[in-house]
């Protein structure tokens, strides 16, 4: 049991810190529109650690002038809190914010086992609940099992490119040569440094990323799942980071680390649940084939360039592909669309991404660093044309470091979109499909 006086002291200090926050200086996030303030549902914001989940919740609550109680369960002084302490936590919140407060915000609530029972009770009592979590298990298991339809999921990623530009005051609407050049320069920086909000103003980016990786591996995975082979977990994480956009070879990893395939798959699953990596399945109408040959992508490009012992080369192609996938996930989340890659057989050139509405392909997206050479252009466009016929999809997009234009190849219209144009377009492009 955690002493009530300690809980009260911690919450009082958090209240003082919360009162000093100035949301008018914060970047507007696309996900702000996804909150349902008057809904009886819990508002659940999930995503990788330090992607801005807390800031997002504080921003939307303060801008609506909502009076709310706040508790950050990621505080080290509350590390030994148990589910039986949550009622004491609630009493302390009432003491600090008043018994008539109807909105409560719990940060990183998954740190307390059994939290879902507590939240469920608060929802039954008519309170409006906001919670954040840095582990997908918060949603996929506990929420789905115990809150059964009583939550509104909001998935937050690090800054998108428009948000990155807003933070750095980059003019994305200017039509002058200078404005265009500045936007292109900012995009290259974005591909290399990534979009973690706090990292944007830090000089020691390597130290920040290493600290972030340590927190994810230790707090979100090791402590939560009781990992025994922590060294193996770290090696798997660094391997996936160093080989982003590649198919995960579970057999090779298992042999190298002296573990079973089952253990390696379990550890990769933990990394996915902590949002460190995002797995991309292969497109197939056969469920068994979708389970084989998954690719691993990083939740943010900054994890590779800025970590210790990084051997990242000047491969702008993989950075662009990785950034495109995360942006597609961001755009598809509101429409509940799925993303796959497409390779019908080992001899075929794959299409990087297939956006699907259930079993219907709505867009094929190919990513290329350069398409100026005729051979490269033919290779990238031919794979789109072939997949278009097989998947019966006519919306074909090629994202490249090239001017935007439309080309017709073998009777198929392909929209070639410059990288800056593609990343700056509306995030809700699938909303009406």
Image (cartoon, grey):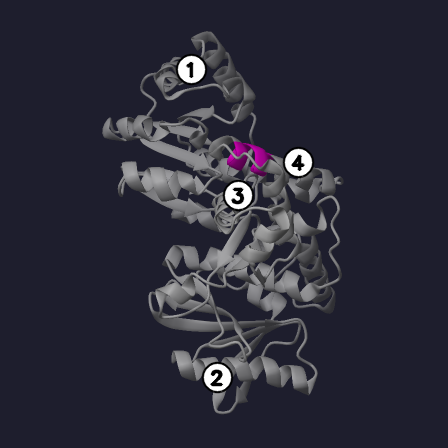
Q: Residues under labels 2 and 3: Cα distance?
A: 36 Å
Which part of the image, by quadrant, shows the C terminus? bottom left
Q: Earlier in the sequence, mark 3 or mark 4?
A: 3
* Mark 4 crowd level (few <14, some 14–19, many ≥20, 10 Å Cα): few
Q: Quadrant of residue 375?
A: bottom right
Which residue was labeled with disc 2?
Answer: 386
User: Start and end of the magenta stretch?
Assistant: 215-222
SS category of the residue bearing label 3: loop
Magenta-colored segment: predominant secondary structure: helix
Tell me where residue 93 appears, x and y as whole percent: 40, 18
Residue located at (37% from left, 39% from top): 43
Q: Are marks 4 and 1 in contact (CB under 8 Å)?
A: no
Q: Is residue 255 magenta?
A: no
SS category of the residue bearing label 1: helix
Q: Residues under labels 3 and 1: Cα distance?
A: 30 Å
* Residue that protrudes farthest toward the bottom in the picture: 410
Q: Earlier in the sequence, mark 4 or mark 1?
A: 1
Q: Earlier in the sequence, mark 3 or mark 1?
A: 3
Q: Earlier in the sequence, mark 2 or mark 3?
A: 3
* Mark 1 crowd level (few <14, some 14–19, many ≥20, 10 Å Cα): some
Disc number lying in front (2 or 3): 2
Which residue was labeled with disc 4?
Answer: 211
Q: Residues under labels 4 and 1: Cα distance?
A: 33 Å
Which residue was labeled with disc 3?
Answer: 48
As drawn, 410 above or below 66: below
Mark yes or no: residue 271 visible.
yes
Q: Earlier in the sequence, mark 2 or mark 1?
A: 1
Q: Are marks 3 and 4 in contact (CB under 8 Å)?
A: no
Tell me where residue 229 appears, x and y as whole percent: 57, 37
Q: Nearer the viewer, residue 51 or 281?
A: 281
């Amino acid at each position: 049991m955690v002493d009530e006086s300690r809980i009260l002291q911690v919450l009082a200090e958090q209240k003082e810190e919360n009162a000093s926050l100035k949301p008018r200086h914060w970047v507007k996030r696309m996900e702000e529109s996804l909150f349902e303030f008057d809904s009886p549902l819990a508002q659940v914001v999930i995503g990788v650690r330090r992607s801005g989940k807390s800031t997002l919740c504080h921003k939307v609550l303060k801008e609506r002038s909502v009076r709310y109680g706040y508790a950050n369960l990621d505080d080290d002084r509350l590390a030994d809190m148990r589910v039986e302490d949550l009622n004491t936590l609630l009493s302390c919140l009432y003491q600090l914010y008043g018994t008539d407060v109807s909105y409560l915000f719990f940060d990183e609530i998954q740190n307390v086992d059994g939290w879902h029972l507590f939240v469920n009770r608060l929802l039954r009592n008519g309170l409006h609940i906001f919670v954040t979590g840095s582990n997908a298990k918060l949603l996929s298991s506990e929420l789905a099992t115990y809150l059964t339809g009583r939550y509104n999921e909001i998935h937050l990623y690090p800054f998108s490119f428009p948000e990155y530009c807003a933070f750095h005051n980059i003019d994305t609407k200017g039509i002058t040569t200078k404005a265009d050049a500045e936007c292109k320069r900012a995009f290259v920086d974005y591909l290399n440094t990534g979009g973690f909000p706090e990292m944007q103003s830090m000089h020691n980016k390597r130290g920040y990323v290493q600290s972030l990786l340590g927190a994810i591996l230790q707090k979100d995975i090791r402590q939560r799942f009781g990992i025994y082979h922590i060294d193996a977990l770290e090696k798997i994480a660094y391997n996936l980071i160093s080989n982003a956009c590649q198919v995960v070879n579970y057999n090779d990893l298992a042999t190298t680390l002296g573990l079973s395939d089952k253990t390696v798959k379990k550890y990769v699953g933990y990394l996915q649940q902590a949002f460190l990596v995002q797995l991309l399945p292969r497109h197939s109408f056969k469920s068994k084939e979708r389970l084989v040959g998954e690719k691993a992508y990083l939740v943010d490009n900054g994890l590779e360039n800025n970590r210790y012992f990084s051997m990242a080369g000047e491969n702008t192609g993989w950075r662009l592909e990785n950034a495109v996938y995360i942006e597609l996930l961001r755009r598809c989340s509101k429409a509940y669309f799925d993303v796959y890659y497409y390779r019908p057989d080992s001899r075929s050139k794959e299409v990087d991404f297939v956006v699907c509405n259930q079993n219907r392909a709505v867009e094929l997206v190919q990513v290329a660093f350069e398409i100026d050479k005729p051979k490269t252009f033919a290779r990238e466009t031919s794979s789109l044309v072939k997949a278009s016929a097989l998947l019966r999809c006519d919306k074909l997009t090629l994202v490249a470091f090239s001017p935007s234009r439309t080309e017709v190849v073998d009777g198929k219209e392909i929209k070639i979109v410059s990288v800056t144009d593609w990343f700056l377009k509306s995030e809700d492009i699938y909303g009406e499909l």
